[in-house]
């Protein structure tokens, strides 16, 4: 997937870059860093699924990936003051999900300690489970950090 | 429900999260249990006492935050020797519990 750079211009709102139908199409939107924005986030995912032609059978996986990453950024990049940009891009059978956070410290989720899914209940803690679920559901998870901009990219296969 | 002619579920179509304890003591959950609904879930789950059955038939979505509220409740119940049994999970919800390794922790029927 040839990622289009998300910069401050992305904050202007929804964009849809289309060539051939669903060949390469991108949608992105900024969201205030608040867990109560999840309803708006899920509405955006609905718009993306319609515009990008993604089958609804992938909806729970994509919602879960985006919720876990979005709430993780809200929780752990608490010093951030700018909106979090969520972007979805479809290229053929691959859906790329990208979350970009601005003016924050580096927090590489791909280096998060693994969750022991065999641990007894007494040793279970909430931390890390969300990222673990993302890694279980996604095909690939990438992290980039450059000059205060934190970018998480997830690839999810949506077709043969 | 989705509008006629559309296979996509819009925001206004999504069933809001709801939780209640029935007269038989069964905890029923419906809709989407995401991070923004955890406080609502825990307000009800905190009132659960003794071994309990949670009917998730109407639960369309759950994230790690929602799972956390169930784990928190199970821990509290087990302190007094009680348990929580989850019933009527959809395949996708069951998968999430499996990925989390919680299908070995909860009794799932």
Image: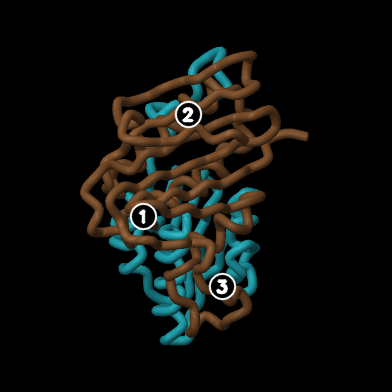
Chain colours: A brown, B cyan
Pointer 3 local density, CA inside 10 Å: few below 14, some 14–19, many at least 20: few
Dot in front, 2 or 3 = 3
Tell me whether the residue at label 2 lies in contact with that at label 3, contact meaning CB atoms closer than 8 angstroms: no
Query: In the rendered image of this protein, does residue B70 appear above or below residue B36?
Result: below
Task: Look at the numbered disc 2 and give the secondary structure of its residue.
Answer: helix
Q: Earlier in the sequence, mark 1 or mark 3?
A: 1
Percent x, y for residue B94? 63, 56
> Which quadrant of the rendered structure holds the C terminus of chain B?
bottom right
Task: Look at the numbered disc 3 and give the secondary structure of its residue.
Answer: loop
Please give the chain letter of the residue carrying mark 2: A
Please give the chain letter of the residue carrying mark 1: A
Q: Which mark is residue A46?
A: 2
Tell me whether the residue at label 1 lies in contact with that at label 3, contact meaning CB atoms closer than 8 angstroms: no
Pointer 1 local density, CA inside 10 Å: few below 14, some 14–19, many at least 20: many
Q: Residue at x 62, y 38 (%)?
A: A58
- Same chain for marks 2 and 3? yes
Between A145 and A41, the one nearer to me in the picture: A145
Please give the chain letter of the residue carrying mark 3: A
Identify the residue under disc 3.
Answer: A114
Q: Tell me how far mark 1 sits from mark 2, CA to CA.
A: 21 Å
Q: Earlier in the sequence, mark 1 or mark 2?
A: 2
């Amino acid at each position: 997937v040839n990622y289009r750079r998300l910069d401050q211009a992305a904050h202007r709102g929804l964009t849809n870059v289309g060539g051939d139908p669903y060949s390469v199409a991108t949608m992105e939107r900024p969201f205030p860093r608040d867990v109560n924005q999840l309803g708006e986030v899920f509405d955006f995912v609905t718009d993306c699924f319609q515009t990008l032609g993604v089958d609804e059978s992938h909806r729970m996986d994509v919602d879960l990936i985006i919720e876990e990453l979005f709430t993780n950024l809200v929780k752990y990049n608490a010093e951030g003051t700018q909106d979090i940009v969520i972007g979805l891009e479809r290229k053929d059978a691959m859906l790329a999900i990208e979350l970009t956070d601005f003016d924050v410290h580096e927090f590489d989720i791909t280096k998060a300690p693994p969750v022991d899914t065999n641990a007894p209940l007494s040793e279970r803690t909430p931390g890390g489970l969300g990222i673990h679920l993302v890694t279980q559901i996604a095909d690939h998870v990438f992290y980039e950090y450059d000059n205060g901009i934190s970018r998480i990219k997830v690839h999810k296969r949506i077709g043969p | 429900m989705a509008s006629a002619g559309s296979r996509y579920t819009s925001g206004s179509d999504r069933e809001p999260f709801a939780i209640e304890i029935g007269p038989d003591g069964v905890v029923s959950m419906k809709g989407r249990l995401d991070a923004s609904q955890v406080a609502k879930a825990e307000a009800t789950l905190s009132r659960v006492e003794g071994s309990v059955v949670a009917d998730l038939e109407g639960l369309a979505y759950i994230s790690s935050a929602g799972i956390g509220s169930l784990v928190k409740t199970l821990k509290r119940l087990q302190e007094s020797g009680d348990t929580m049994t989850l019933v009527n999970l959809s395949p996708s919800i069951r998968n999430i519990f499996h990925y989390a390794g919680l299908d070995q922790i909860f009794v799932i029927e």
